[in-house]
Amino acid sequence: MAELAELEDPKIREVNARHGDDHAVNLTKLRAIAKRLRTQHELAGELWETGDSAARLLAILVSRPKAYSLDELDTMLRQARVPKVQDWLVNYIAKKNPHADELRALWFDDPDPVVASAGWDLTSERVVKGPEDLDLAGLLDIIETQMKDAPERLQWAMNTCLARIGIEHAEYRARALDIGERLKVLEDYPTSPGCTSPFAPIWITEMVNRQLDK
């Protein structure tokens, strides 16, 4: 904790605050500490319990993803508080955990939109890597009726799922493109040169074209 405190930079905190985060440690330096520590699951638990966001990010990096129970991960997501910790917890831990699909089902319809967004993130993972028994048409129905007015984090996760369905499943591509064009979610999102727009019709079209060029 003392080492993390020494790495705090007020300028980094100021930038992160604009995105709802509250840590002040450069993530490259944080990853260097994690690389030095390697996997230390017990230490990860102690770091998480501090409640400090930088410590929780480090905890995620030194965790053993498969060692967490479903209840532990459910509790941790609800404790996470800030976007970066929530994002890392889902992508670095929950997606690699044996209970990933149970968590997806548990979180998907949660009344807390941040928790629900985690369920949608795990659903997007399934759309790409294991779509068997997923109701893709039903997912598009929900996106079509709910995404436009969803809170920001949930809207972003739904939009990602929409794009993944359109990219990975040709039989649903036309409908995914149509939903994106009509709802216009993230149509005006600022995109840096060389980056793909998160606007679903552009995202889907560009990724499909890349696949065809291979």
Image (cartoon, rainbow, N blue to C red):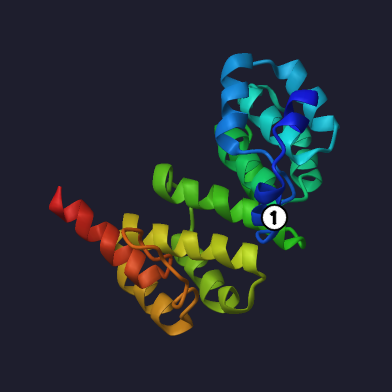
On the question of residue 1 being in view, the answer is no
Q: Quadrant of the N terminus?
A: top right
Given residues 53 and 208, the one toward you in this image is: 53
Q: Is residue 50 left or right of residue 203?
A: right
Residue assigned mark 1: 14
* Residue drawn where x is 20% and y is 60% of the image: 209
Q: Residue at x 48, y 73 (%)?
A: 186
Number of numbered callouts drawn: 1
Residue 169: name its quadrant.
bottom left
Pick the front one: 24 or 151: 24
**Could you tell me residue 65's position as x and y percent?**
62, 26
Q: Which residue is farthest bottom?
A: 182
The kind of residue on which mark 1 rests is Glu
Side of 165 where 143 appears, left or right: right
Sort mark 1 into few (<14), some (14-19) or many (20+) by Cα contacts within 10 Å.
some
* Residue 88, above or below 55: below
Q: Secondary structure at mark 1?
A: helix
Viewer-proximal residue among 10 and 37: 10
Residue 9 sits above or below residue 186 on the image? above
Q: Position of residue 126 (x, y in %)?
A: 48, 46
Residue with the most extreme left position: 213
Q: Residue at x 48, y 60 (%)?
A: 160
Question: Is 67 on the left-hand or right-hand side of 182?
Answer: right
Residue 170 visible in the shown view: yes
Query: x and y percent of residue 174 in the render?
Result: 31, 73
